[in-house]
Amino acid sequence: QKEVEQNSGPLSVPEGAIASLNCTYSDRGSQSFFWYRQYSGKSPELIMSIYSNGDKEDGRFTAQLNKASQYVSLLIRDSQPSDSATYLCAVFAGGTSYGKLTFGQGTILTVHP
Amino acid sequence: NAGVTQTPKFRILKIGQSMTLQCTQDMNHNYMYWYRQDPGMGLKLIYYSVGAGITDKGEVPNGYNVSRSTTEDFPLRLELAAPSQTSVYFCASSYGTGDYGYTFGSGTRLTVV
């Protein structure tokens, strides 16, 4: 059973701080990694994807991947109250997975003014 | 471009009733997926399809059925609804290569009483 694990939180940070969300995965051969943001009562929205070891930056978001440690993280700089949401980590195992993603249980982030 | 459209948005079913959740996409994606999301549990794959006429079970298929007669449509059928099927259901589509993640529909909130 391929697993993706996240700390369910809630993670609470003050406005302007850096929020750090973490995710580990069990399948060492996994190829692609995604972070989705989900507001309460809404559908998940893709915010970051990463495929190679290292960092990938997009605006206030940075995704970090370490395949040796089977670890992927999302940093949100200058956190805003509008960033308050559940963040889902998703992993694509590759091979004959037919594009299927395995999701973690999500981390609830609260940014307080 | 509508993306992925799900209907209905909300539904209350009585135990033993049946219903079909509709999902349509206009992005010409071959790959489509049905997930359910329970509180704190992340997204669990019910069924998926890699093209018209081709479907397969995911992680939690019991109590559900699917069909894929066209590229655009991927309905999910619930037979003999049970309280355990109370959940939020999301349909998603993708190119299937694992490189681009999913586009999600807006979801169907189903309650079985």
Image (cartoon, rainbow, N blue to C red):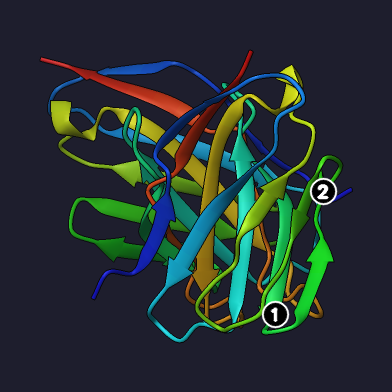
Q: Relative to B49, is B9 on the left or the right?
A: left
Find residue B109 and report its horizontal and vertical position in percent. Answer: 48, 31
Residue pointed to by mark 2 = B59
Q: Residue at x 71, y 65 (%)?
A: B48
Give the letter of the chain under mark 1. Answer: B
Element carrying mark 2: loop
Q: Relative to A11, is A25 on the left or the right?
A: right
Marks 2/1 same chain:
yes
Q: Residue at x 27, y 19 (%)?
A: A13
- Depicted B38 relative to depicted B90: above or below: above
Give the letter of the chain under mark 2. Answer: B
Residue pointed to by mark 1 = B50
Q: Residue A38 appears in which quarter of the rendering?
A: top left
Image quadrant where one finds the N terminus of chain B: bottom left
Find residue B86 and report its horizontal and vertical position in percent. Answer: 63, 24
Q: Residue A65 appears in which quarter of the rendering?
A: bottom right
Nearest to the observer: residue A86 or residue B71: B71
